[in-house]
């Protein structure tokens, strides 16, 4: 039936709890699986990226994450380019009363960034044997990303709540040209965030090497509540993957998709990869590790916005070591530990030996997948 003019249709959109992965016709041993992935030559042994959040990543954590085979993205618009010594800053944030936390963050982040610290932080990571992935908002990427690349950065991430190729601004009629940035920095460039086919396709055409998918699903982000925007991660990932695949068919150039935000368990990781993601970006699970710099506190990129904070500082507590989160052993049955092991076992059940083979896993709409037959678990008996 045709809808009246001006009336929008509302297609369904699915999150992690709405879907399930169907086992394959063939299985393989988990130890035969290869979970490595790459961004135009920049390779990581496990498909895990730590979010560019000050509560998650400092230079020391970046080195720790590199040692585990993944990569941590350092926020170059945050505390580490505003303050030479951040230890006291983290302590102040961690000890602030809950009702004063947002105001304190706004105050601390009002200090201007120091361009000299951009290269210094990259050098700190590289000199200690880490992979240096660094993040900028579009407003600073043009000026500061080349400084990071010159210092030896391995990857540049351009990230905002929502990013597009086309942006109108009174202050900057031209704005950031991603194609020029890709050429200027000479290292893989990952951009985000988006949730749509059309934007993903246009970003790929700019020559970027990876695209971040997700608007508002993070635990410390309140964009969905404050602004009402976002698409559940399963549907968002599948739509962006469809654009990636169409671009690949047209050009033969592969652009990696990274599902960013809302991932809490091994099952969420597996579903992201089954949707077509090449890697996942995670924040809060890493913020709960002993190695994270903020002592179990967590806040998002937009928490400190001076006029419209879209996030909050939350106390997650310190729960486990980084090695336990990624590789186990798991002391819980809720899927929150040994994320790499969960991915390997799931790949084995669907018969996938590589991440790209996992993209072919069949999925079904299954809103009862977590509750069917689980009455005793749900009741606590």
Image: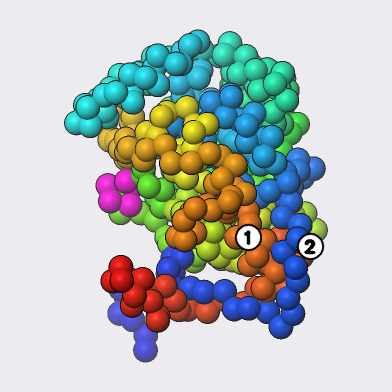
**Vertical position of residue 352 compared to residue 200: above or below:** below
User: Which residues make up the magenta segment?
Assistant: 222-226
Q: Which residue is mark 1?
A: 343
Upstream in the sequence, badge 1 or badge 2? 2
Please give the label number shown on residue 216: none
Judged from this view, the residue extending furthest toward the front is: 381
Characterize the local packing of mark 1: few (<14), some (14-19) or many (20 or more) Cα atoms within 10 angstroms.
Answer: many
Could you say which is closer to the camera, residue 216 or residue 219?
A: 219
| Residue drawn at the location 52% of the way across and 31% of the way down | 291
Q: Quadrant of residue 87?
A: top left
Per the image, the residue denoted by label 2 is 32
Task: Kindly indicate the quadrant of the structure image that contains residue 309.
Answer: top left
In-image side of 318 versus 237 (left or right):
left
The CA span between labels 1 and 2 is: 12 Å
Q: Look at the image and tell me in which quarter the N terminus lies.
A: bottom left
Q: Is residue 223 magenta?
A: yes
Q: Residue at x 43, y 41 (%)?
A: 319
Query: As rendered, which of 321 and 204 lies closer to the eye?
Result: 321
Of 125 and 331, nearer the camera is 331
Q: Position of residue 132 (x, y in %)?
A: 67, 29
- Number of residue marks: 2
Residue 354 sits inside the magenta stretch: no
Residue at 54% from the left image edge and 59% from the top image edge: 266
Does residue 254 sit above or below 324 in this rendering? below
Q: Main secondary structure of the magenta part?
A: helix
């Amino acid at each position: 039936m045709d809808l009246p003019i001006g009336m929008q249709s509302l297609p369904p959109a699915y999150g992690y709890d709405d879907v399930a992965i169907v086992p394959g016709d063939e299985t393989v041993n988990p130890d035969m699986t290869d979970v490595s992935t790459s961004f135009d030559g920049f390779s990581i042994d496990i498909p895990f990226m730590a979010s560019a959040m000050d509560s998650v990543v400092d230079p020391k954590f970046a080195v720790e994450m590199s040692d585990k085979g993944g990569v941590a993205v350092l926020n170059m618009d945050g505390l580490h380019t505003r303050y030479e010594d951040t230890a006291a800053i983290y302590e102040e944030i961690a000890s602030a009363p809950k009702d004063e936390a947002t105001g304190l963050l706004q105050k601390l982040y009002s200090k201007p960034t120091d361009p000299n610290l951009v290269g210094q932080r990259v050098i700190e990571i590289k000199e200690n044997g880490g992979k240096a992935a660094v993040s900028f908002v579009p407003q600073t990427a043009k000026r500061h990303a080349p400084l990071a690349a010159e210092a030896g950065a391995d990857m540049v991430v351009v990230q905002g709540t929502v990013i597009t190729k086309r942006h109108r601004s009174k202050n900057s009629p031209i704005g950031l040209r991603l194609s020029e940035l890709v050429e200027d920095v000479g290292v893989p460039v990952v951009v985000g965030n988006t949730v749509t086919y059309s934007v993903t396709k246009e970003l790929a055409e700019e020559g970027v090497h990876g695209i971040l998918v997700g608007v508002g699903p993070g635990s410390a982000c309140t964009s969905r509540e404050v602004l009402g925007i976002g698409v559940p991660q399963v549907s968002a990932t599948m739509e962006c993957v469809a654009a990636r695949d169409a671009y690949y068919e047209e050009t033969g150039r592969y652009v990696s998709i990274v599902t960013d935000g809302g991932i809490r368990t091994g099952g969420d990781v597996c579903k992201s990869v089954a949707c077509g993601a090449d890697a996942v970006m995670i924040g809060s699970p890493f913020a709960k590790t002993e190695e994270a710099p903020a002592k179990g506190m967590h806040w998002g990129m937009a928490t400190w916005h001076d006029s419209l904070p879209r996030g909050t500082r939350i106390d997650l507590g310190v729960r486990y070591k980084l090695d336990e989160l990624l590789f186990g052993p798991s002391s819980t049955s809720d899927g929150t530990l040994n994320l790499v092991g969960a991915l390997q076992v799931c790949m084995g059940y669907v018969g996938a030996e590589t991440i790209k083979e996992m993209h072919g896993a069949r999925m079904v709409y299954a809103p009862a997948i977590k509750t069917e037959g689980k009455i005793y678990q749900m009741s606590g008996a």
